[in-house]
Every structure is written in C-alpha cells, then in structure tokens.
Image (spheres, grey):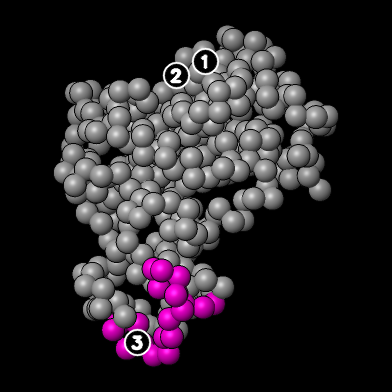
Amino acid sequence: MRKAVFYKMTRYYRRFYGKVLAVNGIPDCKVEGEDEWCRKWSVLGKVDPIYFRCFSRYIGKDMDIVPENLCRNVIEKCLNPSRYLPYYTDKNIFDRLFPVGTCARTLLRKMNGFYYDAAYQPVMLKTDKDVRDFVAGSGVASVCVKPSVGSGSGVGVRFYSSDSLPSLSELTHMYGKDFIMQECLSQSPGIAYFNPTSINTLRLTLYKSVETDEWVVPSAIIRIGGKGSLVDNAHAGGAYVGIDEKTGRLCNEVLDQYGRVRTAFNDIDFTEEHMIGNWDEILRFAKMIGSNIPHMRLLALDIMVDASGRPRLVEFNSSDYSMWLFQFTTHGAFGDYTDEIISYCSRRGNFNPLYVEI
C-alpha cells in the first residue's frame, strides 16, 4: 500500500514538473551537476532528476534542491510522526495551542457538529437569527469563514459582512461538521501595497534542528493576490516572490504557479528594492509558534501582518509543504540545514529504498 502511494505521488510530481518544463521551454534532459545531486539524495530513496533539471534553471546548481516526493514520503515522516498529525491539522485547536492574539479573533467554531464560542463554551444555535445575533453581539463588521480541517490553497475560505451571513443550513452544506468563523483583519500598509484586495501572506519554512534543538527559518516567500482578487494563492491567479530569510529583502522576480518569471506584477517593479518591515519580529513570532508544537520538527507557516504591524498566524502545515515556492525563488527549501536533515533521516532505522515506513 505504501509503495503504491509513493509511486502515485511520484507520478503526480513528475507530471506537474514536466508541465513546468514544457510551459517554460526547458528540455527534460540531463544537466550539469545532476549526477552529484542524485548521489546526495539517493541515501533517502529513489531519486527523480526532474526536480534538479527544473529548479537548477532558476536558482543554479544548488545541491540542496529538495526532491519533493522524498520530502513527502521520507523526510516528513521522519520529522513529523504521523500519529500526531490529525490533532495539529484542526484550526479550531489553535486557540488552545498559542497565546491570545496569535491568530485573528475567533467568534464561532463548529467542532464535530457542535457549536462553541471562542472560549470553547457550547453555544445553542437553532435559527438563522441566532447566528446573526451571536455575531452582531461581537461588534465585528466582517468575518472570514473557512473549514477548520483541510482548507489548503484557500479552498472553502469565504468572507461575509456581519449583516449578510449564510444561514445555518448553508453553513452546514458548505462546511459540514467543522468550520471556524473569525474576525476579518486589515493588513499593514506595507503589505497591502502589493495588492490591497487580498491578504498577502508570508510563507515561512520552520525547522527544529535535530542537532541544536533550536527553531530556525531556512526559507521564506510572500504570496501576492492579483488585482481585485480576494485571495493570494498562485493557483488562483496570484504570484509569489522569494524573501531573503535573514534580512526580509524581496527578490527581484515574480513567479506564477508554473514558474513563469516576471519582474513586474500589479504594476509594481520588483527590480527595485522592497523590504518586509519588522522582519526580526516576524522571525521571533515564527519561532514562538514552533515552540508550542512540541511533536513536530518541520512546519510551513502562513503569516499575515495586521494594520498595526503585528504578525498573526493564518495557519500552519505539518505536511505537503509546497517546496516549489521556495525552490523557484531562492535556494533549496532547507537551506543550510539540508545535510543534517538528510543525515538524520537516513539513520532512522531500516527502510525500503523506494519508500519509508516510520
């Protein structure tokens, strides 16, 4: 079964990156440095050179380019034990994990078919008026509703004014037994500059070193919505830009989901210097998030910066990290920590060279 999953995922990634190569006119043929790269990563399993052939055209002959299928099937399973994943994937748990103010203010949550308030106290909602009155009592003008489990790439995220909320039956139809309703936050002017209609989020890789036990940020990007869009996802017409994880300086190129490169987006020239303000505070915030998730060593954080300049957690991922966002724009997703991750995962017991079971 696990071998079948491995092969299915490997085929999926090969199709995707094959399309990237075709869209950009890049031949799928051997390139300089490929043999060395394959040898480096083969200690973790079967290596498909398509990752190196693709990303080396963007960031150079970087031996730290991560093969996405090995990350998903080997590295994730070594660093993030699968038995803990279901707990951490529920956004309704975030207010239990993190200090007050880490996320947007929660108004209402539905967990396993039952309604609760922000403090996890049961709420009896029997009519549509009950919902409207409950939200009106919070004094919030607009809300964001999304699945509390599995809302990747912005799927299922909807925005409402407090006087145009969906009915109870509509909420159940759209979200089933689990959702979270939060206050809509305004973003900082510096981030809104890139596109004011979408919340433009920072995606940071967060890793707890197996050698030092310290949380570090090896890579980062910013996602930017297209003009007029409410979401920033590349799959929905948005774009992304690499960030120097040490300084917060943006790279000079903007890319779409297929790696098509531009130097301008939303009438903004990215060859000019752009910085993410308060970057050191954002890094401290990211590491605080990690310190409250003791079972995991590898996370992808989505962070927005509110109108006061304060970082807020939108969500975090403990699997399926979208490595391509970083590897199209800056360097291998694990940066300086690649070798220790490979070494650690290769020592994690005996595993089949095609797939791993932890």
Q: Which residues are magenta?
A: 113-133
User: Which residue is labeled 1 in the image?
Assistant: 62
Q: Residues within 10 Å of mark 1 (few under 14, many from 20)?
A: some
Q: Is residue 288 visible?
A: yes
Residue drawn at (34%, 28%), measured in percent from left and top? 243
Q: Are marks 2 and 1 in contact (CB under 8 Å)?
A: yes
Q: Which mark is residue 130?
A: 3
The residue shown at (34%, 87%) is 130
Is residue 200 shown to the viewer in this render? Answer: no
- When the figure is inspected, residue 130 is found, relative to residue 249, above or below; the finding is below
Characterize the local packing of mark 3: few (<14), some (14-19) or many (20 or more) Cα atoms within 10 angstroms: some
Mark 2, residue position = 59
- Provide residue 62's location: percent of width, then percent of height: 52, 15
Task: Quadrant for the C terminus, please.
Answer: top right
Q: Are marks 3 and 2 in contact (CB under 8 Å)?
A: no
62, above or below 146, in the image: above
From what the image shows, is residue 124 above or below residue 141?
below
Which label's residue is closer to the chain start, 3 or 1?
Answer: 1
Type of amino acid at the residue the image marks with label 2: Ile
Q: Amino acid at mark 3?
A: Asp
Q: Are marks 3 and 1 in contact (CB under 8 Å)?
A: no
How far from the left and from the top, in percent, is residue 80? Answer: 63, 40
* Residue 127 lies in the magenta stretch: yes
Q: Nearer the viewer, residue 140 or 214?
A: 214
Which label number is shown at residue 104? none
